[in-house]
Amino acid sequence: MKDILERLDQRRHNAWLGGGQKRIDAQHARGKLTARERIALLLDRDSFEEFDTFVQHRCDDFGMADNKVPGDGVVTGWGTVNGRTVFVFAKDFTVFGGSLSETHAAKINKIQDMALKMRAPIIGLFDAGGARIQEGVAALGGYGEVFRRNVIASGVIPQISMIMGPCAGGDVYSPAMTDFIFMVKDTSYMFVTGPDVVKTVTNETVTSEELGGAKVHTTRSSVADGAWENDVEALLQLRRLIDFLPSNNTDGVPVWDSFDVADRVDTSLDTLVPDNPNKPYDMKELIHKTVDEGDFFEIQEAYARNIITGFARIEGRTVGIVANQPMVLAGVLDSDASRKAARFVRFCDSFEIPILTFVDVPGFLPGTAQEYGGLIKHGAKLLFAYGQATVPMITIITRKAFGGAYDVMASKHIGADINYAWPTAQIAVMGAKGAVEIIFRSDMNDPDQIAARTSEYEERFLSPFVAAERGYIDEVIMPHSTRRRIARALSMLATKQSERPWKKHDNIPL
Ligand code: HXC
């Protein structure tokens, strides 16, 4: 019996070495951890239960019959993050470059099926060279099985991808269908085809970093939702994100102890909005001063910075925050900002996370670049996402809410439950200058007339009270009471029910 136990130990030890010490050393030399080291950091200590440690590929071509490594390039199993179950797979770059074979795919499929059955989040740690070239179509079939499960699980359990090395070919499309993609700076890159193929097809010379590094995907393509300095920081931040997320679409948000009282007053908010309506201020200051302990996990921080999206808590419960940022492009809505916020709103609605919207928006960005780029359709994505959402929605207008952007940014008309405005709010079709130029065109040569008309317009329309008179705004509130108002509204809205007519699915303007 002792022999048998020792043999198991030995086999396990061999499996844990993956592609061997030399390749592990090479991984470390590149500043990357191994698959098992990453899992150990991501999960609670000693909570990992591994599956399929001894699975091997079945390929005989190209000398593969004599080249088998237990585990076949992916480590799979489950564990806990701060006590909550998650399923995980981590590509092992030391084994065939983490490439995906038929059996490697089957291991991931098993974890996907279990995560869905158990209604628990699934996390993929990527560091891989795409389809196992020696296996050909068997590997392509394997990818298809992974993709199909990504789609079925979408909106049921959170799916998160962390890119921690190369991620090429088939390995990019599974992350692309998950809820969030994060990257590690300098060591990870993602592309459908690498620099060599790009050179052959388009004659462009480009490095891996320039083609698909963390900077490109967090600032230009918006493929990635965030990036961190190294493996350790990335995995610790991932733990932080998981603490914000519900396990599935029916359990509701996790509840953590809050050390911040719900009725905390912050008088500095009374002077946050400058007297000059064209002067910017930092909307993140309002967010940090409103949420529990100032803890805000931003999504897509480096992309379309004219809108802010991210998770925070009020009274220990997660809320999704969408906010215009007056510091960037005056907080205007453009195509990129609309797409960014729409995707975030839909994530929150899928997983029953209440949405808090802070509004200071001068309108949609005019111009040919925006119109040719499809602003109408992209803006409609955000309109659609808010209109479709049935979760509790609270909106606070701090300053401008102009034109169509007023409607779009979680107005009462589009379905928000509670709409508050600060006394500094200006809810109107447009700013005073533009309005006067249009409706009093005949007075344009008389400066006195223009000044008089402008102040008349400002007095009447650039305030929250016209909207409040109609009930479009539920109450004009003191800025310092914002946190208390939100906390009270969220607790009242906790029992919200909202029925919609049956449909197979909607047709969001993609
Ligand atoms: C089999 C692979 C592999 C692959 C890497 N390896 N990619 N084995 N299939 N796809 C192996 C290498 O042979 C090597 O084995 C080890 O992994 C490490 O690879 P290196 O090239 O030495 O590492 P590095 O220089 O860091 O380069 C990493 C890489 C490069 C950029 C990922 O290996 C690469 O370009 N691989 C091919 C990428 C690719 O074209 N994949 C197919 C995509 S098509 P040894 O034994 O030497 O350690 C695809 C279609 C699916 O995925 C579409 C579905 C929609």
Image: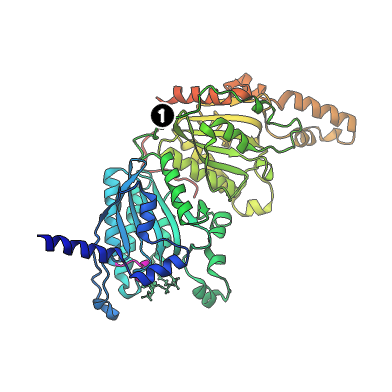
Depth check: give the residue in front, 64 or 475. 64
* Residue 508 position within the rendered picture, expressed as x and y whole percent measured from the top left: 47, 45
Residue 474: quadrant of the picture: top right
* Three-letter amino acid code at the position of disc 1: Ser
Does residue 298 sit above or below 496 in this rendering?
A: below
The residue carrying mark 1 is 498
Q: How is the image coloured?
A: rainbow
* Residue 420 position within the rendered picture, expressed as x and y whole percent measured from the top left: 58, 25
Q: Residue furthest front?
A: 2
Q: Residues within 10 Å of mark 1 (few under 14, many from 20)?
A: few
Depth check: give the residue in front, 243 or 138. 243
Q: Residue furthest bottom?
A: 63
Q: Is residue 357 visible?
A: yes
Callout 1 secondary element: loop
* Residue 249 position within the rendered picture, expressed as x and y whole percent measured from the top left: 36, 39
Q: Image check: 464 left or right of 75?
A: right
Q: Is residue 168 visible?
A: no
Magenta part of the chain = 96-101
Q: Quadrant of the N terminus?
A: bottom left
Does residue 232 sit above or below 423 in this rendering?
A: below
* Count of marks, rendered view: 1
Residue 312 shown in magenta: no
Q: Image check: 107 left or right of 275?
A: left
Question: Is the CB atom of the residue marked by disc 1 within 8 angstroms of ligand 1's nearest atom?
Answer: no
* Residue 414 position within the rendered picture, expressed as x and y whole percent measured from the top left: 53, 32
Does residue 441 sit above or below 488 in this rendering?
A: below
Quadrant of picture, ligand 1: bottom left
Q: Image check: 228 left or right of 252?
A: right
Q: Residue furthest left?
A: 1
Q: Please give the name of the residue rendered at 62% of the width and 35% of the height, measured from the top-left corner.
A: 285
Residue 332: quadrant of the picture: top right
